[in-house]
Amino acid sequence: MDDLVKEIIPLLQYLIPGSLAAWIFYSVTAFKRPDTFGQIVRALIFTFVIQSLVVGLGALFLLIGERFYSLGVWDRNSEALLSGVMAVLLGFLSCYISSSDKLHGLLRKVKITRQTSFPSQWYSAFSTRPRFVVLQLLDNRRLYGWPSRQEGSL
């Protein structure tokens, strides 16, 4: 049992940054959370990207420390701190990219896709073209207004 715990704890520490980035993404955006398997896959993708960035930045920091100026020792604690920072930054960056439609807008310009970054056609229609909306209720009353992005909603 002790061997199992010794193997699982480093694995969980390795996966926490990707899970944090995925949690930030699904907490901030209007995208539906996928099933458990989908959440695990997305957390693993975020983990792969974060760990790749940490390895690359770690090598860069070591090179800068050897040639110019060293701030300290590069060890496991430094990697863990950088992983956490990268997880938060990557989580919010992915939120920005998916909510602003920048990436899909570029892909639409070069005719790779027709999709938008928004979770549904309604989000896309109301966020790109401001329109007046009439909602007809079942008892023949009507609700008039403009859909808008308020603080805390998409």
Image (cartoon, grey):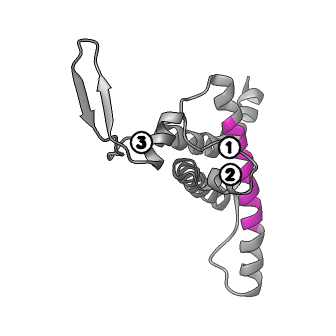
Amino acid under label 3?
Leu
Q: Which residue is mark 1?
A: 114
Q: Which residue is mark 3?
A: 154
Cα gap from disc 2 to disc 3, whole angstroms = 22 Å
* Membership of 48 in magenta stretch: yes
Disc on the earlier residue, 3 or 1: 1
**Residue placed at 24% from the left, 15% from the top?**
140
* Membership of 5 in magenta stretch: no
Q: Which residue is mark 2?
A: 108
Report the magenta residues as a range.
42-58
Cα gap from disc 2 to disc 1, whole angstroms = 6 Å
Q: Quadrant of residue 106?
A: bottom right
Q: Residues within 10 Å of mark 1 (few under 14, many from 20)?
A: few
Q: Quadrant of the N terminus?
A: top right
In front: label 2 or label 3: 2
Q: Is residue 11 visible?
A: yes
**Residue placed at 34% from the left, 40% from the top?**
147
Q: Quadrant of residue 76?
A: bottom right
Secondary structure under tag 1 reads loop
